Image: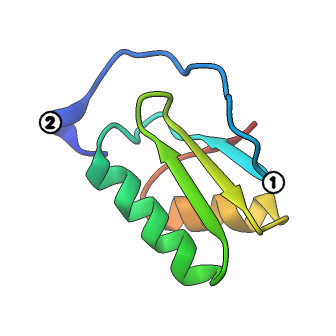
């Protein structure tokens, strides 16, 4: 997590249609979102990723293995919860 970007926001309701969705509490800025997006697209070529920093949500289309996607997010340095 970027220490300079700690916020006390709560997650907003998901308004996105996605195969998989993850709440990532520590994703607080564009840099965080970029790290996660890059890690996922490198690991799963052809997927689409939408990282919503305001809601602290990551939406993934084109992947079906939530455990594998969550593992990539963890390897990038962020804890996530599939929702």
Residue 41 vs residue 77, the one in the foreground: 41
Q: CA distance from mark 2 to mark 1?
A: 32 Å
Query: Among all residues in the image, which is located at the extreme right?
Result: 64
Decide: marks 2, 1 in contact (CB < 8 A)? Answer: no
Say which mark, if any, is on residue 19: 1
> In this rendering, which labeled residue sits more in front, label 2 or label 1?
1
Q: Is residue 49 above or below residue 20?
A: below
**79 relative to 60 in the view: left or right:** left
The residue located at (76%, 42%) in the rendering is 17
Extreme-left residue of the structure: 4
How far across and down, in percent of the image, does residue 63 sit?
A: 78, 68
- Estimate how packed mark 2 is, as few (under 14), some (14 to 19) or many (20 or more) residues with alpha carbons within 10 Å: few
Q: Position of residue 77 (x, y in %)?
A: 42, 58
SS at mark 2 in the image: helix
- Give the labeled residue for mark 2: 4
Residue 42: where, in percent of width, then height?
Answer: 52, 82
Residue occupying the point 46% across, 51% down: 78
When asked about the image quadrant of residue 44, the answer is bottom right
Image quadrant holding the C terminus, namely: top right
Task: Specify the quadrant of the image occupied by residue 49.
Answer: bottom right
């Amino acid at each position: 997590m970027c220490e300079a970007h700690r916020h006390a926001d709560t997650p907003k309701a998901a308004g996105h249609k996605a195969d998989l969705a993850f709440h990532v509490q520590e994703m607080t800025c564009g840099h965080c979102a970029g790290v996660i997006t890059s890690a996922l697209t490198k690991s799963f070529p052809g997927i689409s990723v939408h990282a919503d920093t305001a809601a602290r949500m990551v939406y993934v289309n084109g992947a079906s293995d939530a455990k594998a996607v969550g593992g990539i997010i963890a390897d990038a340095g962020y804890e996530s919860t599939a929702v």
